[in-house]
Structure formats: structure tokens, C-alpha cells
Amino acid sequence: MAVDSKENKKPQSEYTAKNINVLKGLEAVRKRPAMYVGDVGSRGLHHLINEVVDNSIDEALAGYNDRVIVTLNKDGSVTVEDRGRGIPVDIHPEEKRSALEVVMTVLHAGGKFDKNTYKVSGGLHGVGVSVVNALSEWLEVEVRRDGKIYFQSYKRGVPTAPVKVKGNYKGDQTGTKITFKPDKEIFKTTKFNFDTVAERLRELAYLNKNVTLILKDEVEKQEETYRFKGGLVDFVKYLDEQRTPLHKPIYIEGEKENTPVEIAFEYSDSYSENIHTYVNNINTVEGGTHLVGFRTALTRTFNNYANKNGLIKENSKITLTGDDFKEGLTAVISVKVMEPQFEGQTKTKLGNSEVKSIVETIVGEKLSEFLEENPSIAKRIIEKCVRAAEAREAARKARDLIRRKNALDSLNLPGKLADCSINDPEHCEIYIVEGDSAGGSAKQGRDRRFQAILPIKGKILNVEKAKINKILENAEIQAIISAIGAGIGEDFDPSKSRYGKIILMTDADVDGSHIRTLLLTFLYRHMKELIAAGKVYIAQPPLYKIKKGKEEYYAYDDNERDKILKRLKAEIKTKGKTKEEEIVEVEEGEENPEGNTKGIIISRYKGLGEMNPEQLWSTTMNPETRTVLQVNLESAAAADKIFETLMGDAVEPRREFIEKHAKYANLDV
């Protein structure tokens, strides 16, 4: 049957020049804040401080600043003060207004594009401080230069008045002082975390050994000062604090083609690799050409030395590969690049091809000299790498065994996996669930189209203390590797993951926390790329069910429980019922001992298995109502330290960590 096409066409709406919106000034930043700071949660909030501090560090890289002070003020604002040259205040030749106002209110305005001003910088796009200004309720800036103190204030990025001279100062101490208060209209939270800020400042102090960074908290009345004269050597010692090193850190420094390279590394008795790479103080969590250059030089130089000095037996079938030099290696790589090219929007992978050969050449030359001068250390490292090669060969056999075994299984997947029907990984998610009981409820309650369930039994192996061949012999880890489908070790390819989300779902008790930590340790050590890609999540099951008559409410922590109770108590009070016995606490599954059907019944969930499929779906698995926490590598060095503390061999650091953080624990006692 023929159909007139005109009948199917929508009426044409007016589309003219007036429909084209032009966002002026900093409006674009306020309209799409996540494009500039990542998100509007805690991560984006702390990024504001990083942007301002990075400008001060760039002054230090240029040789004009030796101190940065960050103060968390009582009113929720933050002050960042440095001893740099001070932002220019003279009239900009094109904008016809103070350069200070231009820097604070115009995107892509700054000295970072002029290589005579900044040879290298972390603030690469010139949007840093203007973005902070746009996303602040208010911001004030003071500039000390030419004997005068210049001042300007802003409301949500708009100047309240022109730049003015506030007064004079004595001496020759120039600098910039910026105070800003994040906008509650933009951010979900405006409360800064001392430890989060401290971790970044500590990292910057290691990377810039000539700069002192001070963090003050006016609310909690605490202060920390970070200055490390040993620089990267001190950084490596800090990272390996709870491991037993095989030797003192090896330090390599050099410059080629105007690209300074600085590296410190050491081997310890651990089985995991711990490498952190930086470009112009930016943490490149996905590595890049500088990391490739380091690995290539390390493998070639150690192999040449081992063969030259007969450290590998002639009748041995062992051939040392790059993977063998990873075991127990802790390294920090820092390069300064004039025109860095990063892959992706997040600046997490360096793409400059010339940097590979620069790092490779410098490391090759300096490391060869070191090994010739320190034969005992060279022998110790080679012996460890040979043992790693033997374990690698055993792991290869274990992988082959897994492959042969899986070849006999249907679809090469673990038998206890309840897979989903959709084949597109980006629309699929897998729940790794603690226990068969919870796994059964999850299988019944899930949406079978896109949700897969993999129950695991008990606690998996602590991979922090195990060689790769032992890891691959663990049945639960075998199941996880097979289900995700991206391989492991030298075979690992994150693009082959069968799921766009890997969600860990464990009980809200001590054992559940331990199992979750073991799973995270495995993923962090052997599938870190999945975390870096934002594919790993932690499910948040409720702690309480609160029932009043036929009404049911779920609380995910004690504060939420108390808020619900307060509201329900107020409702009861208005009806003339104020007796405390109207509130009854029971274990999930118990009957109300008083037969009370009109009061409030609080049920404390002891485990996921106590929830029926419908409850588990509505509270923890339904994408429209659930809460999941994304695991990220915002501070990989801090994450590594915590994993080593919690899962390593040293008992004392673990005890100290538990004592310090016990107040944050939510335990069943």
C-alpha cells in the first residue's frame, strides 16, 4: 500500500539564527562543569584545588617559586598562596583590561602557551584558574608584585569591580594568593577531605624536591608540611615502606633534546609491580611512551649484563622477558616535556613517540654504568628475575591447563556463571557475589538481559603474597578470569572484557569487607586497566529495612536510618502515639515479638542472602534505584600503599592503619 510521505513528516519548526546559542565568558563552564573538572562530586571538587596548586608548581618549574601553602578555611573556602612572580596586572594589549582579570575570566588565557614564560607546565590548556573562578560562589585574588598588592573579587566568575591596589608590601617577596569557595549550586558536596588534598600535595613534594608544600586545616586544627630533599628516591622508599627492598633505590637523571628525565626504582621481595609515571607532574595512570622506553631499556640492559657475566646457566631453558623484570619492581618515572601529546581527554597516557627513545637511551646508558659499578646488586636482581621467569613458566602451564579444561566446558565459561543474553559488552554487567545464597537471590532478582551473576565461595587467595602460578591455581580466581574473558598477565587485554561493568557485591560485615578487599587487590594487581577504564564498581546494599505498617523504607547507613526514624516518629507523635515501645528492632526474618503491626520495625540485614530476590533487585541491582561506587585510580600511589598495608606481610603498619581508621568502620558486634 502506497503512503504519501508528506503525511509522515513532522511539522517543520522554526530554525533560524536566533536558535543558535552563544555562551559568553565562563557560562559554558557552569553549563557543563563535568567537561572541565571531571564530575560534580568529590573528585571534581578536589580538582579545583589541584588546578590552582598546579599553577603555583608551574612557577616552581620555571624557577620562581619554592613554597605553596594550602589552607582549608572554616567557612568552607580554600586559600592557595605561593611565592611566584605573581600574575601580571598590567593592561592586556588586545583585551584592554588588566591581565589579571583576563587570566581569571577568559578560557584558554594564560602564560602556558608562551614557551618563553613556561618551558613546561602541568596546566596545559590554560583553563585552570578561570574554571575554578567560574565554579566558585566567590573568589578573591591578591597579587604581590612591583611593591604593590593588587586585588580583585568575583561572584560566580564575574568581577565585582576592576583590579585595584590594596596596599604596599615590604621586601622583595612576590606571589599570588587565591581564595575561593566552591559553588553549592554546582557541586553535590562542597566539603574538602584533608587526606585527599594531602595525598596530592605529598606527591607533588616528591616530584619537586626544591618546593615546600604546606597544608593547613583551620577546622580540625591540623597542619602538615611536605618537603623531600631526596625527591623520587624518597618517593620510592615511601611506596616500599612495608616491603623488604633487595637494595637501595637506583637513581637515574639525564636530559636529551630539552627533555629532562628523572627515574628512581628498586626491587623488593614482593611479587607485584608498582610503577608510577608522571609528565610535567601529571600522573599518567595509563603510562605511555615514557613507560615503554623505561621497560625496553630495563629488559635489554639487564639481559645484556646477565649474558655478559654468565648469570644465566648455559643449560638453562630460561629466557628473561620484560614480564620477568616486573616482579617486585617499584619505580617512579618523571619526565618534563615541552609539547606533550596526551591520548584521550583525561591526560592519562603520553603519546609523544620521541620520548620513548629519549628515556630508553638515558636509562640504558646510566643503568649499564650502575650495574658495572655494583655487581652484587646486579646479581641479586637477576636472581630474582630468574625465579620470576620460572614462576612465569609454571603460570603458562597453569593457563594452558585452564584453557584445555575450559575447552571442554560449554561456551568456555565457568559453570556457576549465570550469564546475560545481550552480547554487547558496553551494555552488560557482571555481579561478583559473595556466597551461594546471595548468588541464588541475585540470579532470581536480576534482569537477565544485561546482568550476569558469578557467585564466589569464601575468600579468594590474597594475591599480594602469591606468585602468579599459585594465583592461577585458585578455583575462584580461575572462574573470575574466565567470566570476564580478558585474560591475565601477558595475555590480558581490557578490550576483550565481556562486561562494561564489573560490580563487587559482598555482605556489609567484617567478612564481606575482607572478601571485597581481596577481590579489589586481585583486580588492582592483575587487571588494573579495568579500574583505569572505570569499569569496576562496588555495590551498596542497604543495612536496614524500616517498616511502618505496610510502608517499607531502606537505609544504607546509620545516618539515613536515623533520618527515616525521625520522620516516622514525628508522624506517630501527631497521631498521639509517643511511647518508645512503638519502635521495635528485630533481626531480618524474625517476627515482631510483640505482634506490633502499627509501630516501627527496624530490621538489620546481616547478609545479602537474607534479602529475597525482589528486595535485592529494588535496593541493590536496579540501575534506576541502586547506588554503586565507582573504583578509580585518582591516586594510584595511595591505593598501592593501602593494598600493601592491608594485604602485605608486615603486621605493625596494618595494626596502625586499623587503629587510625577504626572510627569509620561500621561493624556488627
Image (cartoon, rainbow, N blue to C red):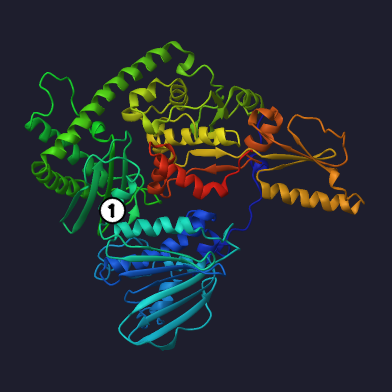
Instruction: Work out whether residue 566 or residue 535 is closer to the camera in this orientation and state it.
Output: 566
* Local crowd size for mark 1, using a 10 Å CA cut-off: few (<14), some (14–19), many (≥20): some
Q: Residue at x 59, y 22 (%)?
A: 436
Residue type, numbered disc 1:
Asp
Q: Residue furthest left?
A: 308
Q: Look at the image and tell me in which quarter the C terminus lies.
A: top right
Viewed as shown, does residue 397 lie left or right of 562?
left
Q: Is 298 located above or below residue 224 in the figure?
A: above
Report whether residue 564 is seen. Answer: yes
Report whether residue 502 is seen. Answer: no
Q: Which residue is the site of mark 1?
A: 234
Q: What count of labels does the image hold? A: 1
Q: Residue at x 36, y 46 (%)?
A: 285
Task: Give the image location of residue 514, x and y in percent.
Answer: 51, 34
Q: Residue furthest right?
A: 576
Instruction: Work out whether residue 16 or residue 259 is closer to the camera in this orientation and state it.
Output: 259
Task: Give the image location of residue 359, x and y in percent.
Answer: 19, 48
Viewed as shown, does residue 267 lie left or right of 494?
left
Task: Give the image location of residue 453, x and y in percent.
Answer: 56, 26
Instruction: Work out whether residue 534 or residue 428 is closer to the camera in this orientation and state it.
Output: 534
Viewed as shown, does residue 500 lie left or right of 320?
right
Q: Residue at x 57, y 30 (%)?
A: 450
Q: Is 540 located above or below residue 207 in the figure?
A: above
Task: Give the image location of residue 351, x and y in percent.
Answer: 29, 48
Q: Secondary structure at mark 1?
A: helix
Instruction: Work out whether residue 513 or residue 28 is closer to the camera in this orientation and state it.
Output: 513
Q: Look at the image and tell me in which quarter the N terminus lies.
A: top right
Q: Residue at x 36, y 68 (%)?
A: 56
Quadrant location of residue 543?
top right
